[in-house]
């Protein structure tokens, strides 16, 4: 019987729908076998289609099979602990698909050997994390200063009467600071007699801090001792504003995040006058230090791999200090030291992948520093301008090995009223370097740096080699060797005859062992530095030569532990230093006044979640340092008393109107130990004055409020 018209209509309507339902329920079988790089079958591997729930796990023989209703071009994924993720494009139709999967061993940061001799890195948390921005600001005694926190690491000396990093027997001028690969000409505020100055930059500007106490990369030069490498922040995840109210002043800023761009503006005002009125000082301030600073940051993402960074910073500060005149037997007479400083630092960098697989990093910087100093009624004008351009190209070779090369150019100009000649230097350098992973357990870094100085009219070639061997799952041995050159300080070049002057030189030999697990770090490192061609002033004829020399050797220990004590983080460092040198106006080869045989520090932090409080303490110790006593015929034979400093801080985490807030209280030198850094003598040696800290204790109180969106703004404008 033929269906009636109604049945015919229903069949005509439902037949195409039935065909669609059959097509929708059609399933495709995907199968295959999973093996490792040696051809051994792998069980328990997860195999699935990306962004779906369709998948399975390989059986004991490595075979797998599953069905899917997906169609079209998809990505088949395989994952397993200890292996790199596998991905392959497949086209799913109606026919069965067979895919053989070959898994490669994963080479993780903890499993792979890394170059570590002389270096402490914090730029990548998968590596050897040492100091992040939060570590710096919560370290008691550091007062939120990058350089203060670095002084808790081995190799650094405690010098409390002047600014700078004194590393492994090297003068402060032998340690350089780099931001995004660019040398910073004036990283500290201007020097003041017997008053140490802070660094100019906030630690929160940087995502990573790498401190190398020796044997560093051929990418960097003009530093015979060490380098501090700072990497600035990239695009922030969200818009944010902050306010800081401190016992020393106020600060604030705001960052606005757009789709591919962020703009940040920050500023601050510091006035130590009210603080000095409440807390007695060991210096006679006529006008307490005051400072104004501001900065502008721009980040712009030009492509999926390209990023432009621009940074401009301005600071102004002034002070008036009455400095004791040591020629006065009663030390009552003083002279006035009046300082006005203006500093501008600007930089721009562009990072992009070019020629498909080369990473290019181009950068320029310009800084202008002007000191207006008046000693009583005698004016001194000091002007410094510094320009640098730099280009680096790097290319991955295989999975881990990297080839990099590049060059830089610096134009330096300096003028000071007490010198009839201006300092003008055009410095250029080129380098090539390769990290070659011979095996996952053995890596070598070989580099060569060439430099030219126009003021010396000299060139040099500096070979540098590092080797590292992975001795266990978490341990390795490293060795580094290299030559490091530096133009003599400009004061030596300008004030004395520079006929025939050449580069000063230090040769580094470093050997270390380290054990780094996920929550613990242990390092022991020994080194030897051989100094040659140091600037030496012949007092007989006031003639400067490169006949100075010296050595520095020692051993260092470092241990950091975030596992043994729950919610605690602490590190211990110790350095032994044996160093002597003949340079500048030294009468004989001797240990310089900034060096000490023994230096140690303990940093301990503990978080109490119930009350959101983090107490922190830092204990620093240094054996006595040499000082010049004109009454002792044995040059630099006297020693100061040992240095002791216990500092504590408390950080309380809370919120004000849903804005994350941190309250900070800290005390430096809790016990008010009468430390002595050196002594100042009158010219005839009859009067002596101890040089100690600017205050017996230093108190700091601050409240920092972060105001911003609670979600990621990066996709807001998509």
Image (spheres, rainbow, N blue to C red):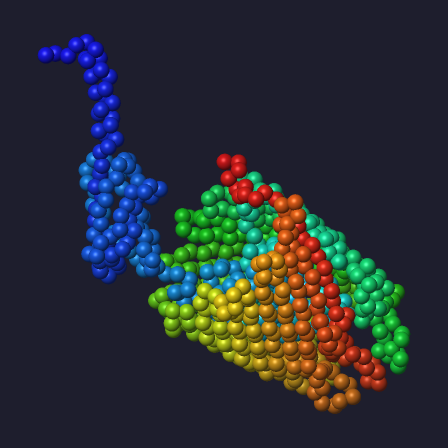
Q: Estimate the x, y position of residue 505 in percent, counting from the top left.
A: 57, 74
Q: Quadrant of residue 370?
A: bottom right
Q: Estimate the x, y position of residue 163 in percent, counting from the top left.
A: 69, 68
Q: Nearer the viewer, residue 72 or 588?
A: 72
Q: Nearer the viewer, residue 567 or 362?
A: 567
Residue at the image point whose x is 62% and y is 66% from the top: 616
Q: Quadrant of residue 581?
A: bottom right
Residue at the image point whose x is 82% and y is 59% from the top: 274
In this view, which residue lies farthest toward the top?
5
Q: Estimate the x, y position of residue 520 in percent, counting from the top left.
A: 48, 68
Residue at the image point whose x is 26% and y is 59% from the top: 37
Position of 647 relative to 35 (above/below): below
For residue 230, say whether it is visible. no
Q: Quadrant of residue 455?
A: bottom right
Position of 69 relative to 371 (above/below): above
- Asked whether, in this view, residue 371 is left or right of residue 556, the answer is right
Q: Estimate the x, y position of residue 631 in percent, counting from the top left.
A: 78, 88
Residue at the image point whose x is 65% and y is 78% from the top: 622
Q: Quadrant of the N terminus?
A: top left
Position of 127 relative to 344 (above/below): below
Q: Nearer the viewer, residue 211 or 382?
A: 211
**Tally of numbered discs:** 0
């Amino acid at each position: 019987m033929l269906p009636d018209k109604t049945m015919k209509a229903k069949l005509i309507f439902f037949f195409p729908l039935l065909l669609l339902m059959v097509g929708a329920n059609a399933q495709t079988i995907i199968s295959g076998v999973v093996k490792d790089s040696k051809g051994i079958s792998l069980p328990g591997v997860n195999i699935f289609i990306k962004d779906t729930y369709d998948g399975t796990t390989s059986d004991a023989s490595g075979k797998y099979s599953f069905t899917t209703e997906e169609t079209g071009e998809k990505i088949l994924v395989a994952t397993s602990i200890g292996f790199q993720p596998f991905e392959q494009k497949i086209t799913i139709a109606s026919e069965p698909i067979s895919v053989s999967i070959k898994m490669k061993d994963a080479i993780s940061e903890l499993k792979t050997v890394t170059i570590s001799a002389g270096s402490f890195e914090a730029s990548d948390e998968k590596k050897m994390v040492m100091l992040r921005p939060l570590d710096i600001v919560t370290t008691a005694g550091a007062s939120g200063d990058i350089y203060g926190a670095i002084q808790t690491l081995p190799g650094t000396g405690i010098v409390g009467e002047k600014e700078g990093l004194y590393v492994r027997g090297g003068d402060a001028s032998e340690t350089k600071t780099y931001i995004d690969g660019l040398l910073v000409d004036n990283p500290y505020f201007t020097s003041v007699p017997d008053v140490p100055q802070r660094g100019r930059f906030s630690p929160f500007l940087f995502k990573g801090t790498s401190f190398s106490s020796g044997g560093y990369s051929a990418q960097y030069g003009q530093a015979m001792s060490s380098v501090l490498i700072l990497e600035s922040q990239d695009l922030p995840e969200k818009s944010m504003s902050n306010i800081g109210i401190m016992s020393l002043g106020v600060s604030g800023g705001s960052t606005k995040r757009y789709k591919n761009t962020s703009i940040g503006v920050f500023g601050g005002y510091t006035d130590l006058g009210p603080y000095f009125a409440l807390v007695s000082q060991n210096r006679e301030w006529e006008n307490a230090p005051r400072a104004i600073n501001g900065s502008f940051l721009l980040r712009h993402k030009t492509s999926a791999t390209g990023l432009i960074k621009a940074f401009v910073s301005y600071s102004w500060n002034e002070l008036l200090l009455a400095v004791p005149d040591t020629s006065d037997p009663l030390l009552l007479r003083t002279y006035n030291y009046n300082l006005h400083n203006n500093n501008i630092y600007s930089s721009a960098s562009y990072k992009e992948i070019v020629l498909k697989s080369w990473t290019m990093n181009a950068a320029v910087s310009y800084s202008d520093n002007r000191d207006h100093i008046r000693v009583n009624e005698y004016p001194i004008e000091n002007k410094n301008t510094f320009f640098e351009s730099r280009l680096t190209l790097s290319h991955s070779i295989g999975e881990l090995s990297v080839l990099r090369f590049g060059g830089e150019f610096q134009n330096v100009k300096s003028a000071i009223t007490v010198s009839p000649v201006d300092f003008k230097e055009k410095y250029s350098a080129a380098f090539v370097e390769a990290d070659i992973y011979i095996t996952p357990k053995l890596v070598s870094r070989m580099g060569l740096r060439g430099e030219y100085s126009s003021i010396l009219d000299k060139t040099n070639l500096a070979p540098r080699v590092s080797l590292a061997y992975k001795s266990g799952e978490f341990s390795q041995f490293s060795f580094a060797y290299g030559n490091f050159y530096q133009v003599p300080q400009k004061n030596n070049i300008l004030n004395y005859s520079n006929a025939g002057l050449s580069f000063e030189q230090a040769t580094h030999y470093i050997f270390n062992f380290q054990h780094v697990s996920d929550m613990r770090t242990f390092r022991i490192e020994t080194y030897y530095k051989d100094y040659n061609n140091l600037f030496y002033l012949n007092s007989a004829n006031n003639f400067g030569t490169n006949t100075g020399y010296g050595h520095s050797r020692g051993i260092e220990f470092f241990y950091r532990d975030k596992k043994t004590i729950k919610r605690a983080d602490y590190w211990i460092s110790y350095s032994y230093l044996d160093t002597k040198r003949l340079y500048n106006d030294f009468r004989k080869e001797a240990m310089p006044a900034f060096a000490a045989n023994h230096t140690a520090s303990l940093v301990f932090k503990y978080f109490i979640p119930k009350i959101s409080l983090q107490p922190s303490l830092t204990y620093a110790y240094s054996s006595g340092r040499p000082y010049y006593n004109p009454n002792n015929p044995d040059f630099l034979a006297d020693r100061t008393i040992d240095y002791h400093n216990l500092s504590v801080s408390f950080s309380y985490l809370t919120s004000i109107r849903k804005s994350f807030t941190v309250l900070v209280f800290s005390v430096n030198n809790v016990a008010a130990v009468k430390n002595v850094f050196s002594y100042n003598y009158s010219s005839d040696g009859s009067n002596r004055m101890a040089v100690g800290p600017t205050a017996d204790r230093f108190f700091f109180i601050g409240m920092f409020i972060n105001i911003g969106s609670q979600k990621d703004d990066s996709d807001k404008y998509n």
